[in-house]
Image: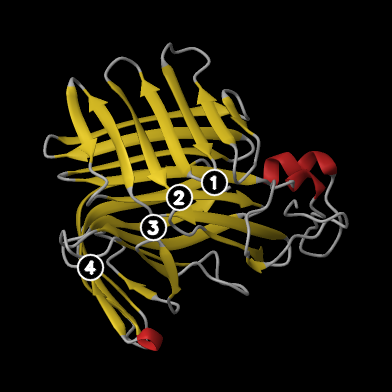
Amino acid sequence: MNLIDISGLPAWGRLSSLPDRINWEQYDARNAMGKPRKAWTKSFLFKHFDFYGALGENFTFGCGMVRLGSLNSTFAYLHSTSGLHRVQFDMPFDLGFQSDYKPLGRTTWVHPFKKNHSVSSTRDAQSRELQFQFGKNFYGHVRIDCDRSETLALNTPIANTGFAYAQKSSGGSVSGEIFLNGNKYTIQPEKDGCYHDWTAGFLRRETFWNWACASGRTAPDQPLISLNVARGVNETSAHENVLWVDGAIHDLPLVLFEYDRDDILKPWQVYSQCGAVDVQFAPEGSVDDHRNMIVMASRFNQCFGKFTGTVKLPAKGLAYSVNGLAGWCEDHYAKW
């Protein structure tokens, strides 16, 4: 079943199964006053991103493909003891970018002019897999096991004009290798953490969110856990705040973020008022993109570092430490 029905309306809330396709072309898109939008405008209003993250020993990796309608952006970075290496390419419209918009499907990007510059994301019931290459010196692959872990899928209303379908995979083991300038970085499935976010929809013209993820094992005899919490986007009728424990999803409450917007490398606090989530984040660096092009703008700060604190599941009488787990905290404003 597709996400959008024959009348142009989406399925809402947490979804028990993944849609066959995000058939956004059939969405009954309206403006804020309820008037139907022209069909040709939908392509510019529809946004989509596909992001992979891996948290290895002494390194953090991220790679994403973003479709904004008027342009698409592909980026990748690796932070290690040697410093931060980052690449980014912006292309007009969908040049080089292709997606079938299937939650279980494929997204690709190929640079039209640079040789050996490509990214491929393949999603099936067993895994999420990333293959990437940026020239001769930065390439690799990442595989997240989804066969024994649950996938979080939800679709929430965005104001009175749009929707946001979010699909998160972070509870399974991760493996792979990344090569940079002759050095090999191996992802170890028995202890390392991961994250995959596949989001599509008609988002707000001006969008803001905070997001935090901590993933991995705190010790060899401890469960594989992954914390995913956010505020600002997916909170109308359903939300994305969950804790994976050995692949099983457990709901968490809404959370607050406290941090210094003028100095994002200072410690962060992420907590719920009920006390179930009480974690601290110490950034070790960040990937930033601050651009104001009047019609479009971005204030993107994706910090990576280490977490401390506790996440509780009161209904089950359980508590999990995140002490020493690596992860991300994000501060992101976009006008698109």
Between tags 4 and 1, which lies in front?
1
Residue at the disc numbered 2: 146
Q: Nearer the viewer, residue 142 or 138?
A: 142
Q: CA distance from mark 2 to mark 3?
A: 8 Å
Residue 82 % position (x, y): 12, 34
Q: Is residue 280 left or right of residue 277?
A: left
Residue 187's image quarter? top left
Secondary structure at numbered mark 2: loop
Between tags 4 and 3, which lies in front?
3
Residue 268 % position (x, y): 25, 67
Among the two numbered marks 2 and 3 on one chain, the one whose residue lies closer to the N terminus = 2
Crowding at mark 4 (Cα within 10 Å: few <14, some 14-19, many 20+):
many
In the rendered image, the vertical position of residue 228 relative to residue 28, given as above or below: below
Q: CA distance from mark 4 to mark 3?
A: 14 Å
Residue at the disc numbered 3: 171
Crowding at mark 2 (Cα within 10 Å: few <14, some 14-19, many 20+):
many
Q: Is residue 290 visible?
A: no
Residue at the disc numbered 1: 125
Q: Is residue 23 left or right of residue 310?
A: right
Secondary structure at numbered mark 3: loop
Residue at 25%, 73% in the rendered image: 279
Among the two numbered marks 2 and 4 on one chain, the one whose residue lies closer to the N terminus = 2
Amino acid type, mark 3 = Gly
Residue at the disc numbered 4: 322
Secondary structure at numbered mark 4: loop
Amino acid type, mark 4 = Val
